[in-house]
Image: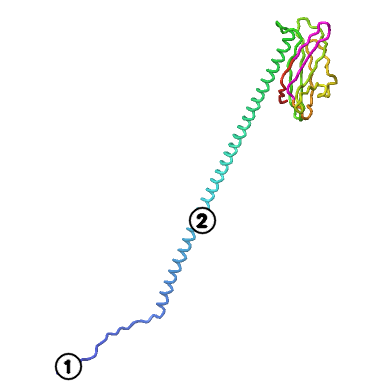
Amino acid sequence: MTVVKGSKEYQWAVVKVRPYARLWQAVILATLVLVAVIGAYFIGQHGVQNGYSRAQRDLAAVRAQLEEVRKTEQQLRQQQENAKLGAEVDRKSLEDVRQEVIELKATVAALEEENQFYRNLMAPEGDKRGLRFGPVEIAQTDRTRTYRYKVIVQHVATQQDVITGTLSFNVVGRQDGVVKVLPLKELSSSVDTTNIKLRFKYFQNIEGELVLPEGFEPERVELEARTAGSNSTVIEKRFAWLAQNA
């Protein structure tokens, strides 16, 4: 038997149409999103401001610490320089004192030698009495072949009388291989006679400068002092030419 199928039955409902509902929903959603974005922006700005302020404070603190460190470094450098200067001053002072001690020792030695010289003059002992030569010096100057000389002739006695006499001063050497004797008169402009006059009671200094001629090589100095009168005394002294630095 044939079955006839009928069409489906649909249920219908009446719905009230609201054309602006979706629009309002979109507006509200957009508003919420905008508020959220603005809020996030202000929150971010506040965080940035706080972070910037904190960074500024930290930077100022670091700069202050750096300035303190620089000041401390400057003070330490100044203290170091002061210490160096003090050490240099101490070293210079020590050197000055050392040099002064050396000079004083030399002065004391010279005074002791001079004191001994006068002691011998005023208080002769034993065979030290009579006419004799004191210290004899030959010293080189800063001029070529020019020398300073000094000879002391002294008379040691218990009773001192004025002594008169002469002194001959000769430099013996070689020139062109030949022995040559040069009197002081030919070497020194301050001496005008071969026999230098002596007149003294205790001692007499004969000193000045002499210039050796070119090509002359000195070997020794010969001195002879002779007193005048009936009881004439003659003394001689010869020594190698050993010129010291003036």
Res 151 quadrant in image: top right
Q: Which amino acid does label 1 sit on?
A: Val
Can you say whether 154 is above or below 174 in the image? above
Q: Which of marks 1 and 2 is in front?
A: 2
Instruction: Find the residue positioned furthest to the front.
Output: 178
Q: Is the magenta stretch mostly helix, strand or loop?
A: strand
Instruction: Find the residue positioned furthest to the left.
Output: 1
At label 2, counting other C-alpha atoms closer than 10 Å, the crowd grade (few under 14, some 14-19, many 20 or more) is: few
The residue at which mark 1 appears reads as 3
- Quadrant occupied by the C terminus: top right
Q: Which amino acid does label 2 sit on?
A: Tyr
Instruction: Find the residue positioned furthest to the right.
Output: 192
Can you say whether 12 is above or below 163 in the image? below
- Quadrant occupied by the N terminus: bottom left
As drawn, is 110 to the left or to the right of 78? right
Secondary structure beneath dot 2 equals: helix
* Pointers 1 and 2 in contact (C-beta within 8 Å): no
Residue at x 76%, y 18% (from the top left corner): 222
Range of magenta residues: 218-236
Q: Where is residue 117 in the image (x, y as percent from the top left)?
A: 72, 13
| 1 or 2: tag closer to the N-terminus | 1
229 is within the stretch colored magenta: yes
As drawn, is 60 to the left or to the right of 97? left
The residue at which mark 2 appears reads as 52
109 is within the stretch colored magenta: no
Between 98 and 4, the residue placed more toward the observer is 98
As drawn, is 84 to the left or to the right of 139? left
Secondary structure beneath dot 1 equals: loop
Res 72 quadrant in image: top right
